[in-house]
Image (tube, coloured by chain):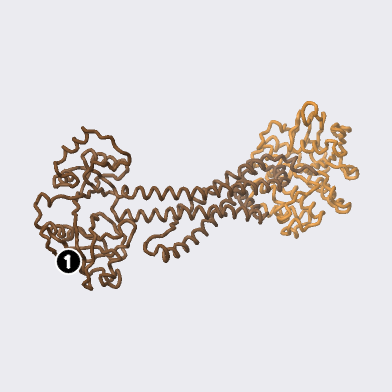
Chain colours: A orange, B brown
Amino acid sequence: MLLLSIDSLPYSKDGIDDNIASSFRTTHYRQGDHMSVQVAIAAKKLDKDYGKGQSLFHALKDINISINAGESVAIVGKSGSGKSTLMHLLALMDTPTHGAVCIGDQEVGELSKRKQDQLRNQTFGFVFQQFFLNGNASVLENVILPLKIAGINSRTRKQRGLEALEDVELKDKANNKANDLSGGQKQRVVVARALINNPKIIFADEPTGNLDSTTGAKIEQLLFDLNKKKGITLIIVTHDPDLAARCDRQIHIKDGVMLSKGVKS
Amino acid sequence: MKLKDVFLTASANMFRSKLRTALTVLAIFIGAFTLTLTNGIGSGISSYVDKQVNTVGEKDLLAITVKTSSSSSDTPQLYKPGQATGVASARSAGSTGLLTSKDIATLTADPDLTNVEPTFAINPDYIQGLNGQKYKLTSSEISSGAKLDLASGVELDNATSTNQLILPLNYVSVLGYSNAADATGRVVTVAVTDAFGEQRTLQATIVGVQQPGLVSSSGMSFNQALRTNAYDLQATGLPPAAKNKYPEAAAHIVGDLSDSHIQQIKNKLDSMGYTAQTSEDLLGTFKSVISAITWVLNGFAIISLLAASFGIVNTLLMSVQERTKEIGLMKAMGMRSSRIFLLFSTEAMLIGFWGSALGVFIAILIGQLINHIVSNGILKDLPGFNLLAFSFTASIGIIVLIMVIALLAGTLPARKAAKQNPIDALRYE
């Protein structure tokens, strides 16, 4: 059993509750090590309603999911099915009407706003369909944004930024403007940005939606490599059946209800 | 996000929409520029008046006269028989309007006053200089405590027994001297007429030349020795009772010079039957008019700043709108709402800073230019008068004031940014 050094984890000194951190320390296995199964993120009886009275709309109903550390999961569904809402709830960007989200074995609803912000900053990585890069800033500047938010000093930022860009083979573009890159390159920058804080979970919302099939395949490969080599839990929201099929497990959502079982069979 | 990074990011964000930022900075610039100039005019005039006050007398100097029936108060006073007779009876009869030796003795004995000096009413006839021409002389009652705005030479020495005088600048050339420095140290002749109608002369040394001013432009200043000697000559043949009467006495205040203490002494002298005025009283009205005008001008400048602050609100609201997705992304990545607020507030403050710093700087440059032109033009007769005066504290004060206004203007957009919901911001359209 190969445990990564605790010192290399970003949150070990930063005041996140120890029980959250420790649940990740024990889950940090190499792929293929099936000795023990740790839950990375779980949803318990999630409901999400929008509106009130006559216009009340149940976006999600009774969602129960448990995703293990190192797993790759696809959340599949048509547009308007509630899959994005589910991702937002899991990524702590929204609060459920009923039910709870657990990160490790910590129920998130019990954490302060500040702790939740910290958790998002240090545990999650985000890959978006629309990139959300600052086009006028350099590639490096875009990549180090999560570290800047975390308050890490500029030397470490630069060093880790270049490392992350090396991982996506864009180190030579570090000082280029983000606008000058192709779509595939931009998405690789986004992946580098998602990677830079050594996240436990990467949320990818239609990561290949804006790319042609060749470059899309490259991004897919990059994400699954990270999943395999670094043991990062991958949660992909997609309506692309081929991409979904590459994941360990698919969670199908239709009209806010889960069609398949959310727990690994 | 560290404060340093917040500052640097806000600074960089300012330049993302250059034209828009530049226009907002320009609006602030105009406000700051106007405020600096109006404020400069106010303090320029005030400091000149202060200088003039010093030529009249020091702060601890009181000019004491006999209280006349018409009080120094602005409003008509009710006639109170008891009080009036009380005052009259406290003073020696028949001496209304003039101080007697007895008054001087009373004042000298007062523990709150020191160096009580009667002012002699000297009526010199003429002054004669290098070229022998005789020029009329206006009497001068400037007391020994005065500080003069000198073009050349030194202040009068009241301890010496030699006759000294200070010449107004406009007498220099008519008396036959080439310039102020040339006149300094020369001996002139001053003539007075005694009680028998006989003209008598005495010699005096010019120790300094005085700049013309608003308040004491025509007066010539004599030192104690010259005043005493001239008065003695002039009073030759007068009966002793008439001789020892003075229109005014100068006295220095003992103790602290706080306004309340000065007022206390003035009240006490008033009850004793004297009117006491400080040099500030003499110029008080003038100064209050100037400061009122300054405030009106500053008011206009501040109104233009308020208008400019709406420019800041507008600019930043547009920025928040444009950067909705970016703000959403930062929040998704764990940026705290308070830091987003700080980011936009800092940007507002930076716009305020650049606008005001540039405005103040350019206003000072142009102010110096105006001073240069004006002192060689319409204000040529008032040397030493700078129309605009800029102090370091006032300039910093203006910059800080504008930054505070900008900060307040920035709170609305900053609040809007901080309240952004990451989901709404990142939602696909």
Residue nearest the observer in this picture, B412 or B275: B275
Q: Tag 1: residue type? A: Gln
Depth check: B213 or B154 in front?
A: B213
Residue A92, image quadrant = top right
Residue A259, located in which quarter of the rendered image? top right
User: According to the image, label 1 marks what residue?
Assistant: B203
The x and y percentages for residue A97 are: 76, 29
Q: Quadrant of the C terminus of chain B?
A: top right
Position of B118 with respect to B425 (left or right) is left
Task: Confirm whether residue B30 shows in the render.
Answer: yes
Which residue is farthest top? A53
Residue at left offset 87%, top offset 42%: A239
Q: Quadrant of residue B255?
A: top left
Task: Determine the chain carrying the residue at label 1.
Answer: B
Q: Tell me where residue B109 appears, x and y as whole percent.
A: 16, 43
- Rendered position, B305 above or below B179: above
Q: Identify the residue at image location x=83%, y=37%.
A: A83
Looking at the picture, tell me which residue is in the foreground, B52 or A218.
Answer: B52
Say which residue appears at 88% left-offset and 39% top-offset.
A78
Numbered disc 1: secondary structure? strand
Left or right of B86, for residue B168:
right
How many marks are shown on the rendered structure?
Answer: 1
Q: Horizontal and vertical percent for residue A231?
A: 79, 44
Residue A36 visible to the viewer:
no
Which is more toward the observer, B342 or B106?
B106
